């Protein structure tokens, strides 16, 4: 019993020492906290502001087009010319004028029977040309509505007469009164969570390992009256604490960003937008499920960061070793759209990939126990392997003291 108490006291002493090492540089730690809270909102708000600025700039630009073979349907040509948002000019070489930016695009008119075929040619390399295609499409569609209504009136028909079957769509979640998530939320949330989990703790993991090598303080730590296994575990525990703190701050700031962001921040209203804000349907139960999914991954990431930092000779080399892990998390985080409630069970054996799939299922309202159990077993199996390797790293003098 006394030995157990002694081991616990040594562990907590080492753990406090590692946490104090992390927080000793107040400037770095405060920067970490501020970036965890503000980086996500700034990135999302900045993206939305840039898109809105670009949209307004494109709206201000005059849309200059030409119409090829206007005689095919003079009424349509005149309707387009009468629109105040469009200026129609003559052209002798449509493609050359479009390529030289003299035109934003041109309409090629043809006719098959009684049907008018209006094809708009635009330049994909020009944002202004792409924007003009949307305006021209809206104008042509409004003309088509007028012509269709004239035909209906002439033949004493209504729109219902032309649509004998009314087809609509509704999601299972709506039928079951389950919350639905905006596509932007489903895309960004797993990505932000993974980046927050890894990036927030990476710099401090390097500081506690490769950084101590550079400062020649690691030898002092190893000389303490504690096993090297306990020293390694205490470092992993300290980084685990930082990972979870970074995770909580990133997710909280992301939630606030979506709740407070204007509905039109990323353009016209879209599914999942309600009451003037991007809808984020995350209940307390969903947050608990997200935490349960990420807790095993936090252990794995913390041990892996310590392993890479221990093997590195200095902080610069440690940063190089961790960079592939960060890039992998970015790529995997953005592939969340590929997963759904029917993702094969084998996917959950793969760290990071399986956790993104689990997060996607949780956000969709599905917490599938068997998938969670597979992921937990796989993650902790790999964690114990990395933990074993990390502890053995601390026992190898040629690794600990190499320069």
Image (tube, rainbow, N blue to C red):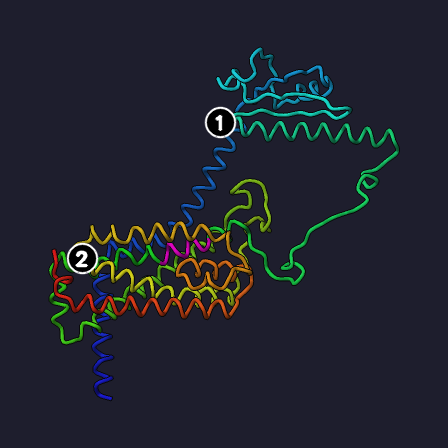
Quarter holding the C terminus is bottom left
Overall secondary structure of the magenta section = helix
Residue that carries the numbered disc 1 in the rendered image: 126
In front here: 9 or 29?
Answer: 9
Query: Residue 85, located in which quarter of the rendered image?
Result: top right
Magenta-span inclusion, residue 194:
yes
x 58%, y 56%: residue: 180
Residue 291: percent from left, percent from top = 43, 66
Q: Can you name the residue that lies furthest to the right here?
A: 156
Residue 197: percent from left, percent from top = 36, 58
Q: Secondary structure at mark 1?
A: loop
What separation in Å lies between label 1 and label 2 (alpha carbons)?
49 Å
Q: Which residues are magenta?
A: 189-197
Residue 158: percent from left, percent from top = 83, 37
Residue 103: percent from left, percent from top = 54, 19
In front here: 136 or 310?
Answer: 310
x 59%, y 44%: residue: 269
x 77%, y 47%: residue: 166
């Amino acid at each position: 019993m006394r030995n157990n108490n002694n081991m616990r006291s040594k562990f907590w002493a080492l753990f406090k020492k590692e946490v104090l090492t992390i927080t000793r540089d107040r400037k770095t730690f405060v920067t970490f906290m501020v970036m965890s809270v503000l980086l996500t909102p700034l990135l999302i708000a900045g993206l939305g502001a840039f898109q809105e600025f670009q949209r307004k700039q494109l709206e201000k630009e005059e849309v200059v087009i030409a119409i090829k073979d206007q005689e095919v349907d003079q009424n349509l040509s005149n309707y387009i010319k009468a629109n105040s948002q469009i200026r129609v000019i003559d052209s002798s070489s449509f493609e050359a004028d479009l390529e030289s930016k003299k035109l934003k695009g041109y309409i090629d008119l043809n006719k098959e029977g009684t049907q008018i075929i209006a094809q708009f040619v635009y330049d994909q390399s020009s944002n202004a040309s792409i924007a003009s295609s949307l305006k021209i499409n809206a104008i042509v569609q409004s003309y088509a509505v007028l012509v269709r209504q004239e035909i209906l009136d002439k033949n004493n028909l209504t729109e219902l007469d032309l649509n004998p079957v009314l087809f609509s769509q509704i999601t299972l979640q709506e039928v079951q009164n389950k919350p639905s998530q905006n596509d932007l939320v489903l895309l960004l949330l797993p990505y932000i969570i993974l980046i927050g989990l890894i990036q927030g703790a990476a710099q401090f993991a390097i500081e506690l390992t490769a950084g101590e090598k550079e400062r020649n303080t690691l030898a002092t730590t190893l000389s303490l009256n504690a096993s090297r296994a306990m020293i390694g575990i205490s470092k992993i525990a300290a980084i685990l604490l930082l990972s979870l703190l970074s995770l909580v701050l990133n997710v909280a700031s992301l939630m606030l960003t979506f709740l407070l962001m204007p509905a039109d921040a990323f353009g016209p209203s879209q599914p999942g937008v309600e009451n003037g804000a991007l809808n984020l349907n995350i209940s307390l139960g969903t947050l608990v499920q997200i935490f349960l999914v990420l807790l095993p991954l936090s252990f794995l990431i913390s041990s892996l960061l310590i392993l890479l930092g221990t093997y590195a000779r200095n902080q610069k080399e440690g940063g190089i070793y961790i960079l592939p892990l960060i890039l992998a998390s970015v790529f995997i985080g953005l592939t969340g759209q590929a997963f759904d409630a029917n993702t094969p069970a084998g996917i959950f054996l793969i760290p990071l990939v399986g956790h993104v799939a689990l997060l996607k299922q949780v956000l969709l309202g599905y917490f599938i126990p068997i998938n969670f159990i597979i992921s937990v077993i796989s993650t902790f199996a790999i964690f114990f392997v990395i933990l074993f390797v990390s502890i053995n790293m601390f026992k190898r003098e040629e690794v600990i003291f190499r320069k």
